[in-house]
Image: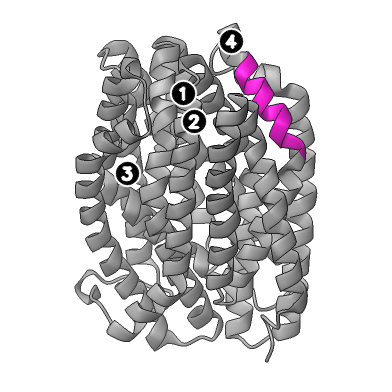
Amino acid sequence: MVKAVKPMTSGSIWKRMTFFALPLLLGNLFQQMYNTVDSLIVGNFLGSSALAAVSSSGSLIFMLIGFLSGISSGAGVIVARFFGAQDQENLHRTVHTTVAFGLVAGVLMTAAGMIFSPQILIWMDTPESVMANSVSYLQVYFSGSLGFVMYNIFVGILQAVGDSRHPLYYLIASSIINLVLDLVFIEVFHTGVWGAALATVISQVVSALLCLIQLMKTKENYRLQLKAIKFDKKILMEIIRIGLPSGVQNSIIAFANVIVQSYINAFGEMAMAGYGAYTKVEGFGFLPINSFTMAVTTFVGQNLGAKQFERTRKGARFGVLVTIILAELIGVLVFIFAPQLIAAFDSTPEVIQFGIDKARTAALFYCLLAYSHSIAAVLRGAGKAMIPMIIMMVFWCAVRVTFLAVMIPLTNSIQAVYWVYPLTWALSSVAFFFYYKKANWAGN
């Protein structure tokens, strides 16, 4: 018998949020392992050039997936609201509308990714020496887009109702599959970088199927019935209203990062590999923060749905404080152990130095990044996704691109690329602070 999921509308705030976030942390850890395992195996077995090809693909992948993830986060907020309010009819309609949206979006994303990724890599000034590998990696990766999209849709529903355990179990299984297939494809069949992408696709499809089975067999009121999958116009419009700002925000920020990656590419393969290795380290380092911000969004959504406004405010304050403290502790560790962490991906001295320079520029400012993310999570849970979109688009997109367009020609230094991130984190944090201080986001 499947254990009932307890809503986050009662009980100890810190316990409910922490015990919800811990499985998320482990799940995010295994999720991060997908591309990281690819990078570790590619970097160690195929060399710096192949690692550069995989690393340069990350921003483009997130640009497309980030849009759909933002939309699905909007669905998650609505699911959390109806689940907290125990509105079974609207919860049922939301779950099935969200799945219908994911199926359509997955097909469209497959076509867009496979068709446009070569041209976008050209626009990114990807070096000719890694272009063929980058194209093959991306096209295989995007061929499995339906699996990626549906996995995010299913996990979003489960997490919105407070179930963070089952996604963890499925990620553990699929991560092991990914690791084994990476080694088999690259070491046994000598496929090259596209084999790493294929391993990721297969393992992600497995995790999506496991989530699907869980949603179909649960006895809870969010149970998925295949014959009931269809669009409800009113619910779809609400999903788009809340999710579209997050999706647009993710995509535009990712597009800005594609531009940033093009500046990195101009400094050559070693810079691309070192920068790519650092991004993997940062991805792991920021997992606890991502886990707590997801918990914050779910907590805020459920408690506002139950009209528990004071509990909502207390939970938001706790979540923001925890994310800031965790981020700075992690930043200190990354700063200290940067040489060892970067060397795990590539032992080439020049690659290691590029990665160390980036780490020691950004790591001590992780608290600012955490603050921006945590306040954005609170506002999304409250259904106010437009404010995070505007703030992050202004500072993480427009300011970043403008700064680099001015500073790179003046300095011709990769340090300008490294410093643009702490600078824009600081600016967005200031904007969030003043908005959050004045806004009545959880008013009754």
Q: Is residue 80 above or below residue 162?
A: below
Q: Amino acid at mark 2?
A: Tyr
Q: Amino acid at mark 1?
A: Ala
For the residues labelled 1 and 4, the Cα–Cα distance comes to 16 Å
Magenta part of the protein: which range? 353-364
* Rendering coords of residue 368 (x, y %): 73, 50
Q: Amino acid at mark 3?
A: Val
Q: Is residue 112 left or right of residue 345?
A: left
Sooner in the amino-acid sequence: mark 1 or mark 4: 1
The residue to which callout 3 is attached is 206
For the residues labelled 4 and 2, the Cα–Cα distance comes to 18 Å
Displayed quadrant of residue 292: bottom right
x 33%, y 12%: residue = 187
The residue to which callout 4 is attached is 350
For the residues labelled 3 and 2, the Cα–Cα distance comes to 36 Å
Q: Is residue 231 above or below residue 286?
A: below
Q: Is residue 291 visible?
A: yes
* Rendering coords of residue 273 (x, y %): 50, 20
Quadrant position of the N terminus in the picture: bottom left
Residue 263: which disc? 2
Q: Give 54 or 177, whichever is nearer the viewer.
A: 54
Sooner in the amino-acid sequence: mark 3 or mark 2: 3
Looking at the image, is mark 3 or mark 1 nearer the viewer?
1
Asked if labels 2 and 1 touch by Cβ distance under 8 angstroms, the answer is yes
Asked if labels 4 and 3 touch by Cβ distance under 8 angstroms, the answer is no
For the residues labelled 3 and 4, the Cα–Cα distance comes to 38 Å
At label 4, counting other C-alpha atoms closer than 10 Å, the crowd grade (few under 14, some 14-19, many 20 or more) is: some
Displayed quadrant of residue 443: bottom right
At label 2, counting other C-alpha atoms closer than 10 Å, the crowd grade (few under 14, some 14-19, many 20 or more) is: many
Residue 339: which disc? none
Q: Is residue 302 left or right of residue 246?
A: right
